[in-house]
Structure formats: structure tokens, C-alpha cells
Amino acid sequence: MGLKLNIAATSLLLLLASAAEVSGDIIFDVTKYGARTDGNSDISQALLKAWGDACSSPVASTVMIPEGTYALGQIIIAGPCKAPINFVVQGTVMAPVDTSRFRAEAGWITFQQIDQFTLSGDGVFDGQGKIVWGTKCLSSAYCNQLPINLRFNFITNSMVKDITSRDSKQFHINLLGCKNLTFYNIVISAPQESLNTDGIHIGRSSGINITDSTIETGDDCVSIGDGSEQINIQRVTCGPGHGISVGSLGKYPNEEPVVGISNGVRVKTWPASHQGTASEMHFEDIVMNNVGNPIIIDQEYCPHNQCNLKSPSRIKISNVSFRNIRGTTSTQVAVKLICSQGEPCQDVELGDINLEYNGNEGPAMSQCKNIKPNLLGVQLPRICS
């Protein structure tokens, strides 16, 4: 059964003020610039012209992709712009099927260096990824060359809401160097068999909010990389997918610390890693519905056995809490806390954990290594005993 993870937080922390929606009187409609709704004609040039006029406008404006089906090649939509812009997508935008038409390690659609930007509408970004999912990603070289549906590079004080990302060839959404960016009521959709299709990957960004959204993928629903600070995830339904993960960390030198994560279920680091830290991570008020491995700290993360387990991870994990996590697990090991022999976890707290195993092997259990957690309230299963 596919993983189902429902995140429900008791407090509301949606920073709408930092990404106020723009509803300018000036509308730049791509069809007025020659975009055709036949689903075959590339609208890249029409979109760039509409964006250029909006970006140079001294007053708030709207770029519009109306209802219909549009073909769009690889494109970079860049600022800085003179005034706030609302980018409204009402139609379905289709990516090229042929991967040779993409530059390696680039996105399909990249938004970069824009302040006070809103991406909205009930439109769909369709990556048409089914053709590539059958290729196994045992080597990262192949996967890294596949296009990400939406890249956000150095976007500030902005919002993405009400849009859908469907069937990306790789990650659906990737963030780099963003500040004060909110995702609200978005849908990310890909089948469970889609490889390496993380829903949202966050890297070296701060003040990121993901709320009231649905993420269905073949990989992590949300993955949080190095240099991420003040990440808030609330009321997100995740599944199928691998849940919400911090890491993997430590694979590359000079990775930046991970600080201030709210809500999630997994922290993972590579063995034989470079030195780094991950701290101030708090996972609260989460309901599990038949989830495999509901709570994990894994500092021996080694997919495809391509690492040296004899050398411990050098990532220091500290000040982590798991509170009020309840529901059912599809694996007998409901709580797995495997910390590094070289850098044992410190200040890890588990309070009011109530997870019931649905299988026939016996009651739910925990597995612990190189950790002495602080235990509060209900402990089902018994943790590290």
C-alpha cells in the first residue's frame, strides 16, 4: 500500500503578508503576443515578450496564460523587475517529451531573481515524464540531466498558489537561495513508480512555508537540503511517496547547516560523510495512516549500497523533537533512530508517540543506535528499551 502521511499543525503560520498577491490593472496576455493554443506550437518567444513588458512596467501587472493547451520549451523567466508581477496560469502547459531538447542539469521552467512575485491560477504544468521513468537511476549522472518542472532561484517575498505540477521528469519543484517564499494550496502529482520525482526540494533557502497542499510522488514529498533555515510545513497530505525528509546530508564538502525545521518525519545522512550540522528540527502533531517507517533518524543512509558503512557519518544532529505523532505503521519497526558512532545524536526528545502496527509479526517496535533520547508521555512502541 502506498505511503499516506497527513500533517496537521495546531497553529497557523502562513506568511501572506510577505507575498501579497498582485492584481494589477495591466494584463499581458501571451495570446496577444502570438501564443497559440494548439498544444504543438512553442509559446516560449510569446511568453518572454509578455514577461519582458511586464517586468519593465513601473506599476504592478499580470502575465496571463489563458485557458487552453500550450507547448512550452525550456525557458528562463528572470528579473529583477520594476514592480510586483502576478503570473497567472489558467491553461495546461506541456513540456517537450524529447529530453535531448533540454540543457543538462537545468529546469524546464526557471524563475529567478524576482522579488514580490506571485505564481497563481488553477493551471497545470505537465512535465510529460512517463517516457523517462522506466530508466533506472542507479547512476546519478542520468537523473541529474533530466529537467525539473519548476525551478525557483533567488526568489524573495513571493507566493506560489493554486497551481498543479504533473508528471515531472525529475523533481517537480526546486528551490535555491530563496527567502520568504510561500506555497499554498498547490497540487503535485506523479504515480508511485515515477523515479526521483521529489515534490519540493529546498536548498540553501530560508523562510519557506508549505501549507494546505497535496503531494503525490515516487520519491520524497518534501526534501530539505543543506543551508535550509526556518522551514514550515503544515497541513500537507503526502502519499504515495517517501514522506518528508531532511537530507540526505554530508555527501558533498562545505555543506551549510540545516536549522529550524518544523514538521516532517525523516532525517538522513550519508556514512563516510563530510562534516556538518543539522539542528533545531521539530516534528509535531502528525497523523500516520499505514506509513512505512514513520519516524526515522538514519545516519547510515546508503541507497544502492554505494557507500562505505565502516566509516561513520560526520554530521552532528542535535536538538530534535518528535511530539504527538500517532496512527498506524505498515512496518514493524515504527521508530528507527540510528545515529552516528562518531557523532552520536544529542538532545533528541520523543513525546506522546502512539503508533500501532497493522501486520502479523507482533507489536510495533523501535530500533536505536548511538542515542539516548529524552522520553515524555505515551511511548507506543517502547522506545530504545
Image (cartoon, rainbow, N blue to C red):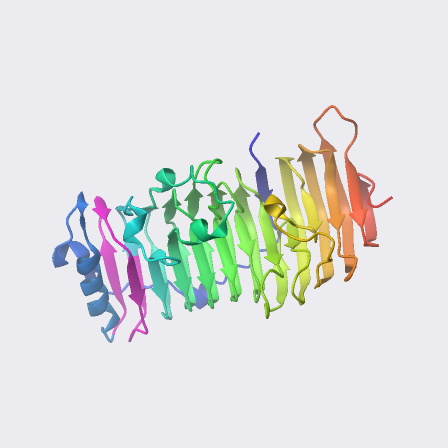
Instruction: Locate residue 235, reporting x and y percent.
Output: 55, 48
Q: Is residue 307 above or below residue 116?
A: above
Membership of 39 in magenta stretch: no
Is residue 265 left or right of 350 when viewed as pictured?
left
Q: Residue at x 32, y 74 (%)?
A: 80
Instruction: Locate residue 284, reporting x and y percent.
Output: 67, 51
Is residue 267 left or right of 68 when viewed as pictured?
right
Looking at the rendered image, the quarter that the N terminus falls into is top right
The residue most toward the right is: 385
Q: Residue at x 22, y 63 (%)?
A: 48
Q: Residue at x 68, y 36 (%)?
A: 327
Q: Is residue 197 above or below residue 271?
A: above
Looking at the rendered image, the quarter that the C terminus falls into is top right
- Give the total number of marks visible in the rendering: 0
Membership of 65 in magenta stretch: yes
Instruction: Locate residue 247, reporting x and y percent.
Output: 60, 56
Q: Is residue 136 above or below residue 117?
A: above
The segment highlighted magenta reads 59-87
- The answer to whether residue 67 of the structure is visible from this angle is no
Q: In the rendered image, which quarter is residue 357 located in?
A: top right
